[in-house]
Structures are given as C-alpha cells and as structure tokens.
Amino acid sequence: MSQMPQQAALSKCPSCAEPLESGDLFCGACGHDLSVVPVPPQDHPTLTMTGSPVPGDGVDWPAPEPAGSGSTPGEVHLPADLPGTDSGGKPLHAQEPAAPGVRFDRPPEPDEYPLQAPDPRAAAAVPEEPQPVCVACRAGRVDSDGYCENCGHAQPRERDHMERESGPVAAVSDRGLRHHRNEDSFTVGHTALPDGSPAALAIVCDGVSSATRPDEASAAAAQAAGDTLLAALPRGTHPQQAMHEAIVAAAEAVNALVEEPAADREHAPHQNAPACTIVGAIVTSGLLVVGWVGDSRAYWVPADRGAPAARLTEDDSWAAQMVAAGLMNEAEAYADERAHAITGWLGADAYELEPHTASFKPDRPGVVVVCTDGLWNYAETAEEMSEAVPADAAERPLHSARVLVGHALDGGGHDNVTVAVLPFPAPPQGAGSA
C-alpha cells in the first residue's frame, strides 16, 4: 500500500512552539497532531519604489517581462504604470502619477508665475492736504483725533473758532471759555467802487441767546448783509445808503427763519423767534461808514496813539437808555445787572427795525475795530480798546484780530468773541496782512 510521504522531523510544535522529541506524533503541550503540517505560504518580498527587491532579502526575483506583455505573477510595476482615481472616484489626469494620500484633482501648476505690472494710477503720487496748525500754540500739527501733537490742546469745531482774511480786512471769532457753542458770525470782503478806488467791509453779528437758533440768526444776517454790500458798492450806491440796505436785508433774512422748521414751533411754541444784533463798517480811501442795531460796537483807533481813540456806535441797550435819559452815569449803568438787556435787535419779534448809520472822515490813518460784547466787556472804553490793539494793526489786521480775541480769553472769555479789523484808509487792491 502506498504510504504518505515522510516529512522531516519537527523540532517545535507548529501550534504552540513547544520543543518536540524525535518520533512524537502529538505535541505533549497542546496535543497538536504533528502528522498534519500545513503548506507554507508563498513569500512576497518587500519592493522599493523602483520595483527592485530589497537587498539582502534572500530571494532571487525574475527579471521584468518586456513592455507590452501581459501581467504575470511577480511582475514589477512602477507607480506611474497604475491607473488611479481621485477621492471622488474620478479618473486621475493621465499625465499625473498617483501617489498614496495625494489628490491630483486640480490643474497642473506652471513652473513660473508671471508678475502683474503695477497700476500706473496707483503709483502716481497723491498730493497730501496740509495739516492744520494748532489754534492754541500756533506751532504743533493737529492729529486725526483733533488734538495738537505739540501741546495736546483739543482743537475747536469749525464754528467754534473761525478766521477769515479778505484783502486788507480780517476777522476772528471764538466760542470763548464758558459757552457750549459759538453764536456769533461775521462776513469780511473787499471790492472796488465805480471809480476804481478800493473799499473794504466787515459785518459782525451776535446771536441773542434767549431766542431760538441764535447761531443760525447771526449766520443768516452776516451773510445777507455782506452780499448786499458787495453788490451795492460797485454799482455806485453811497456807502452809508448801502449800509442801511444791508441792515434791512439782514433783518429780512433773520425774519425768514421764523417760518422754518415747523417742528421747532410745535415743540417750543412760546420760544422767542431767532434774533441777533449787527454792526458793520465800510472803509474807502477817504470815508468811514458804520451801521448797527443792538449792542455790538465799532471803535476808531488812530495809528498815532497820541490822538484820541473813539467809540463810533451807541448801544441799543438798557444801560445806554439810562445814560441818555440822565438817570445814571455810564459807570453806574454798565455796572447794573440789566446793562446788557438790549432794546434793539434783528428778528421777527423786534418792536421796530431802526437801522443806525453814521459816516466819518478821519484826518489820519488808523484802524476800525468791529466787535461783539465778548470783546468790549474786557476793553469797554475807547482808551482801553486802543491799549489792547497792536501798534501794527493796520499792517497786520489778521494778527491784530487774533491778539484781541486772546485779550478777551485772557480776561475770562465769558462770552463768544468776534473781532474784525479794517485799516483806514482802505489800501490799494492786493494789500493784506503781512
């Protein structure tokens, strides 16, 4: 009878790896049948990424079949030879190799990226706006937050501090130290008379705080009066008549404010109508004209301080009435708490519009100071005003207006302060502050 082929004696149990004795048919440890030995699995050596056997694995691999032959066991493939799909199941691009863990579902990237030429418009230099100068120290620049980089002073809002210069005339207006807003306004300008001689003008208005929208009233009055003068003087209207017409136009502009807005009347039906005072001056080569309603003033200050200065206006006020009636002297009247109660103003609820005008022919050069009571409260008499005005005011009107505003602020600044300075006689066209 045929017999089963004899197997080589085993030294270890193929099941539990216990040592065996020669001739054992069963494992003494686990009872495994040693007569049944499984066929060892076919070995598969590790391949490198080139498909070559790892050196030293002890296996001789056959050489790869020529290209184009069918796949046979033991055939070596390079990674690029195998088709692949992306993570979504789509075939990979034929020109790109598949690699474990790498997606190739995007277009190939170029070797070089062209640089985009810069936009010539972006390269063009943009002119920078000049930084404003601090109104306090006159040296530092103002940052984007509204503070001086030099002294740290907070800069005022546009209406809180205004400065204007027009030819030979200049004006400055400031909120002061106590008020929450500036209710003053002004207009300055210069023009030529029909004969070609120069003329300069200034209008200063002070809003009545007890009325509604006093800031709007002063702005409307100053604008209307200035526009009227600049239109009338070149036509040949006499300066004194032109001043009268300018005050009437200013009154009409303030009266018009009572009609708007309707919401204000609904919320405050018993509030006074918008109101303000007005004072103005016109200087030519030989004539000085002033006009006013209320208690804003105009002063004459000669260049030769040996000559007396003069106040050119009379207040529409309780104090002035007391003095005119002989009931009080000027010192007593203006010391009274009722002194600044005005008896004349521009506004819809004014008793009657009575524009005051006066003309003068000074015999020497000097300056006209047009101002609100925010200044003259600190330089009330003509002599005091003359002392406060700089000696070179005719040559530097803007500088002088700044000095006078500073005088009021140094004195306490209890009210809004507005000052205009006009040299007399009016200098030729083109002259201005040094």
Image: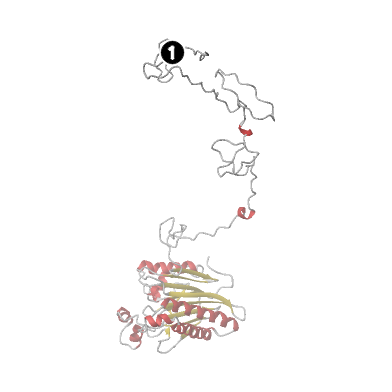
Q: Can residue 195 be seen in the rendering of this structure? A: yes
Front residue of this view, candidates 95 and 224: 95
Seen at 65% across and 25% down, the residue is 64
Residue 233, percent from left and from top: 57, 82
What is the x, y in percent for residue 191? 57, 76
Q: Amino acid at mark 1?
A: Ser
Closest to the observer, 235 or 362: 235
State whether residue 115 is above or below residue 72.
below
Outermost residue toward the front? 1
Q: Residues within 10 Å of mark 1 (few under 14, many from 20)?
A: few
Q: Nearer the viewer, residue 67 or 415?
A: 67
Q: Residue at x 63, y 43 (%)?
A: 113
User: Based on the displayed image, in which of its 4 quarters is residue 91 positioned?
Assistant: top right
Residue 368: horizontal and vertical position, in percent? Answer: 47, 75
Residue position marked by numbered label 1 in the rendering: 11
x, y percent for residue 189: 54, 75
Residue under the image location 46 percent in, 86 percent down: 355
Secondary element at tag 1: loop
Horizontal relation, residue 223 to residue 197: left or right: left
The one nearer the camera, 133 or 425, is 133
Query: What is the residue that sits farthest to the top in this orientation?
Result: 22
- In the rendered image, the vertical position of residue 154 relative to residue 98, given as above or below: below
State whether residue 275 appears in this view: no
